[in-house]
Image: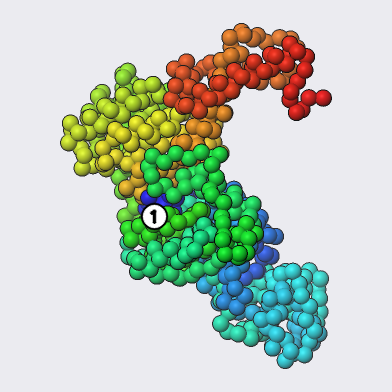
Amino acid sequence: VELLGLLCADLACQLAILEELQAKMNAADGGPTAVTVAFQGERGAYSEAATFELLGKTSVQPVNFPSFDEAFQAASSGKTDLLMVPIENSLGGTIHANCDLQLQHSLFIIGEHDFRVRHCLLALPGTKKEDLKKVISHPQGLAQCDSYIKALGIEKEPAYDTAGSAKMIAEGNLKGVAAICSEVAAEHYGLEVLDRGIEDDSNNYTRFLLLRGSPVRIPPGVKSKTSIVFSLDNSTGALFKGLSVFALRDIDLGKIESRPCKPDVMNKLERLFWAMGGNMLAAHRHFHIKDPPKKRQRTDGGPDPVTYPYLFYVDFLAPADEPNAANALRHLQEFTTFFRVLGSYPRGGTLLGLELLGDKIPATAPMTQALKKAKKKVGIIGFGTFGQFLAGKMVNDYEVFAASREDYSQTCAAMGVRWCATLQLLLQQRLDVLLISVSILSFEAMVRRVATTLTELNLLDHRTLVVDVCSVKVHAKTCMLALLPPCCDILCTHPMFGPQSGQHGWSGLPFVFERVRCVDAPSCEEFLAWWTEQGCRMVDMTCELHDECAAGSQFVTHFTGRVLSKLQLRTTPINTKGFESLLQLVENTCKDSFDLFYALYKFNPNSGNQLKSIEEAMEQLAKELKDGTSTSSSSS
C-alpha cells in the first residue's frame, strides 16, 4: 500500500486541479488565462492537433519545444501546466524515447487520446496539384503517403518535421513545393489545403498521453487504465510469475512490452527503488545503501544479463487503488527489482479534473459540487514555534485544531486555529490528520498518551492519519508502529525547513516522507498532495536511509557548529567569505536547542558512528600536523 500510494490522490487532488485551472481562466484582469500544454515539434504538429482534439481550443495554449526532452523538462519544472506526448503509433510502434523520459521525470499520466492521423497536402495559396514538382515532410510522413506521392509523379524530400516542412514553404515562399502535415499547420502558416486524407493506410492512429505533476483519483464506475514499469531478477520463470499476479485475479492487460535499458541506468533505477523502500513488504525492514540488490546471474550460457537488462511496460485495465489491483501490485513487488506506477487514468480520452477546459464546463458541475465538502480536520500536538509555522499555512486549507503543554489560546485565536486545552478535547474532534510536533526526547511519551487516550475515549473505530515531523526518523517510525492502534495510519515526514528558511515560501524546499502504514491510501495521498501544492520538493525515502544520510549531513552540521561555538569565534576586520560562512553556521546551529542536538545523537545510531569517525579524523589530522606529513591523496 505504501509504494502504491505514489499513484493515488484523493478527490481533493482533482479539486485542486479544477480550482487551479479555474483560477487561470478567471484572472484578475477579467480575461481567461490559457492553460499551457507542452508538446514537441513546430506549431501545427500532430501533437498540437491532438491537444486541440482532446482539450478543445478554448483557454488552451500549446507551447512547442524543439525536443521531447525539453518538453518533459518544461512540464516537470512547472513552466507549463500539462504535457502532451505521443507514446505509440499503430504503424510505427512504440516511441521509446518517451518511455525513457517518463522514468527521468516525476510526471503522472492523467489521460490518453487515440489520434487518427490524417495527412494533408499543403502548398502556397493558389497552387494547383499539377504545379507541384516536389513534396517535403518528415520521413515517416513521406513513407505513409508513398503510393499517393508516386501517383502524383513528383520528387520527395525528407525534412526535420511534418509541421516544419509547412513552415519552410511559408517562410521560404517555396513555389511548386508541397508539404505533408496536419491541417492545423495550414492555419498557422497560411497555406492552402490541396488534399486531405492522403495516407496509404487509414488505420493510422497515434496514442497520446497527457501528463502533469499531480496524479488524479479515479472515482468508482469510471473505466480506467494503469500503466506500470518494472524490472525482474534474471531467473527462470520470473516474467511468468510477474504476469501471473494479474491472471490470478482476472485483471485484463491492455499492453505488455519489454525494453532494453542501459546497465548504468538500470542500476541507478534499481538502487533508487530499494533506497526508497524496495518492495515495502515488511514494515520493520531495514535498508542499507551499501547493500545493493544481488547481481543477476544466468547458468544456461545465455546472453550476459548485464549487457541486456530489460524493463517491462504493462498497462492493465483497472485503477491501481481498486482492492483487487492493489493486491496484484503488492504481489508483483515480491518479484521486482525496480517498480514504478506511471499513472492511473481514465480510458479512451475521458478527462477527470480537467473538464473546466473549453466547452466541457457544464459536465464538471456535479463533480465540483461533490468535491466541495467541508474542510478536513487537522490536529497539531505541540504548538511551539514549528507547530505555529505549519499551522500558519494549513489554516488556509484545513480546519486546524491545536493542543500543547503551554496555553496558546490567544495565539490560536489570532491565527484562526481552534485551541483545545487538553489532549482529550483535541482527539474528540475525530481528526482526519493528527500531526505530532513535539521534541524528539518527548516523542515516545506523547505517542503513548495518544494511544492510551484513543482507547479511553473509545475512538478506535475512527481512522486517523498520524504524522510526525521529527528530525530522526527510525525512532519515530518504531514508536508509532509499536504503540499506535490499528485505526491509526502512519506517515513519517521531515520537512527540512523552518520559519527562517521557509519565510519566503516553501517552493523547492525538501519534504522527506515514508508511507509506513496507509490503509486509507487516498487520505494519505491527499495530505501529501497538499505539501506538493505548497511547492515542496517531495523526497520519498525510507526512515532508515534518511537517518543514514542525516548522520552524514544534519548531525555533522550541528556538531561542527557546536564545536566552533566552543571556540568563541568572533568577527574580524579581515573576514574571508569562508570565515563568514563559519560564523553563520555557528549562529544557525546554536539557535536550535541542545535537546535537539542531543536527540540527533541519542536516537540515531548512525550519528554515534559518525562521531567516532570525526574523533578518528581529528586524531589523524592532529598527528599529520605534528609530523608535518599528510596521508591525504590530495597532498602535494
Quarter holding residue 217: bottom left
> At which x and y percent is residue 266?
59, 54
Label 1 neighbour load within 10 Å: few <14, some 14-19, many 20+: some
> At which x and y percent is residue 532?
48, 43
Name the side, left or right, on which 570 lies relative to 113.
right
Name the side, left or right, on which 120 lies relative to 178.
left
Quarter holding residue 554: top right
Task: Tell me which residue sits at (43%, 54%) in the image.
Answer: 333
Quarter holding residue 483: top left
Of 92 and 635, the residue lying toward us: 635
Q: Residue furthest bottom?
A: 151
Which amino acid, by three-letter code, is at mark 1? Arg
Of 611 and 14, the residue lying toward us: 611
Task: Tell me which residue sits at (75%, 20%) in the image.
Answer: 630
Of 373 and 608, the residue lying toward us: 608
Above or below 204: residue 453: above
User: Does residue 375 show up?
Assistant: yes
Asked which secondary structure carries label 1, the reply is helix
Colouring method of the image: rainbow
Task: Tell me which residue sits at (59%, 69%) in the image.
Answer: 94
> At which x and y percent is residue 379?
32, 33
Name the side, left or right, on which 523 lies relative to 561.
left
Above or below 122: residue 456: above
Read off the residue under disc 1. Answer: 330
Above or below 272: residue 98: below
